[in-house]
Image (spheres, rainbow, N blue to C red):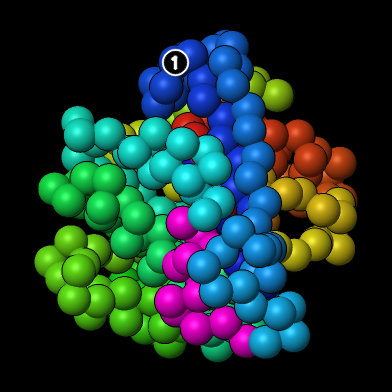
Amino acid sequence: MTRAIPLLCALLSALVAGAGHALDAVADAPVADARVAIVRSDWEGLAAPVPFDQELDRRQIEAIMRAAVDALGGMSAFVGADDDWVMIKPNIVTLSARGSGDITDAWVTLAIARLVHEANPAARITIAEGSAGWISPGHPEALDAAELADGFANTGFRELASDPDLAGVVDFMDLNFEPAVEVVGAATGDRYWLPQAVRDCDVFISNPVLKTTNVIGYTGAMKNLVGVMPGMKYGWSKVDGFPPFSGNPGLPNHRAGRFAEMIVDLTSFAGVALAI
């Protein structure tokens, strides 16, 4: 599985567990290999290095991403011929503009999708998010919980589907409204609701933005997994529970003293193989 971080460099980490994407066993599976690749935009190994103070275009971003993925064996090391469904989970927690730094840059996700399509042209590619800051149109059951907006369109992600090489390949999924099943966290043994789609996809790629949180500081790529948790179970924000004032518990917050453990739980059952 895969994860990606957008800035003026690309950082990728791969955790290849013995159990692969078998979520029932992933908590107990030994980690057979753990690798990290970091490529700066000004690396001399790139065909056209770019200084850090220069804004990158799509072509330059893809070149950096390709170099980082190639350092880990290429995308085919993560997406095989039998992997019919690849899910890419960026961070689109707010309705911010592309390049704001608050959310994943859509051009980074575009580069990932293109690399996935090259590795397996027949695979379905789903861009999935369960934002705590907006609600997709068509879900009146969640009205007034957050701002009603097409977050994939407002932040530039729907443009991915217009890429000539990805026509008919890319779709979008709001994980807040997907059917969910109960899973058990490896760190605490607590039970959580996880969208069935996260279990069903063949490859899960986490694509967070590189940033810190004022709750527990730096979380690497792990906090991005909060966005897979369905709002129809956990609310907007996801510490509130849903429906509002129903008494249904949300995810533990930092005041509950279990926030760090909760993030480890989410990582344990999300089945992430690659983070970018």
Picture layout, residue 56 above or below residue 217 = below
Residue type of the residue flagged with mark 1: Ala
Q: Is residue 64 magenta?
A: yes
Q: Is residue 163 magenta?
A: no
Asked where in the image residue 80 lies, by quadrant, the reply is: top left
List the residue tagged with mark 1. 19
Residue interval drawn in magenta: 55-66
Is the stretch drawn in magenta largely helix, strand or loop? helix
Percent position of residue 220, x then y? 72, 49
Picture layout, residue 81 above or below residue 19 = below
Q: Of residues 177 and 1, which is closer to you in this image?
A: 1
Picture layout, residue 135 above or below residue 218 = below
Percent position of residue 164, x then y? 18, 76
Left or right of 90? Residue 11 is right
| Mark 1: secondary structure | loop
Q: Residue at x 62, y 87 (%)?
A: 55
Percent position of residue 205, x then y? 45, 47
Q: Residue at x 75, y 65 (%)?
A: 211
Left or right of 213? Residue 19 is left
Q: Of residues 164 and 206, which is closer to you in this image?
A: 164
Total tally of numbered discs in the picture: 1
